[in-house]
Image: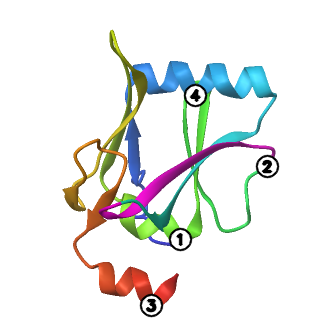
Amino acid sequence: MFNVPGQDPVTLTDAAVAHIAKLMAREDAAGFRIGVKKGGCAGMEYTMEVAAEAGPMDIVVEKGEARVLIAPMAQMFMLGTEIDYETGLLESGFKFRNPNVVDACGCGESIKFADMDAADTQA
């Protein structure tokens, strides 16, 4: 829907590929779906879940053994995003380096996109 022909809308680091592949194998899943929803103090939040199958409107990005499914409502917000998986002393998790984000809450769980009005009318 919102991707550039011949170019993946998101990129995956090697760490993200390894972790997504591990999650998919553990759950016997067809992919790892990423979406966005209203919520949090900045207005939007990423959603992530293992998926039994790709939806008909999902954009599928494959790298190695990892398969990311981008939900239709998230596609316009995810263009140009790098998805990483970081492991630290206190926390580990997926990190999104998204050029479309203009603000985020202090904890990083909630984000705001440049044109929230357009997102509000489509949700």
Q: Which mark is residue 73?
A: 1
**Would you identify the image quadrant in which residue 56 lies?**
bottom right
Amino acid type at mark 2: Glu
Element type where label 2 sits in the image:
loop
Q: Whole-Å distance between the Cαs marked 4 and 2?
A: 15 Å
Q: Pick whichever, 5 or 51, lies toward us.
A: 51
Q: Whole-Å distance between the Cαs marked 2 and 1?
A: 17 Å
Q: Whole-Å distance between the Cαs marked 1 and 3?
A: 12 Å
- Across and down, in percent, residue 4 comes to 39, 64
Magenta span = 41-52
* SS majority, magenta: strand
Q: Write the residue at 62% across / 23% down.
A: 21
Q: Pick whichever, 90 or 118, lies toward us.
A: 90
Residue placed under numbered mark 3 in the picture: 121
Q: Residues within 10 Å of mark 2 (few under 14, many from 20)?
A: few
Residue placed under numbered mark 2 in the picture: 53
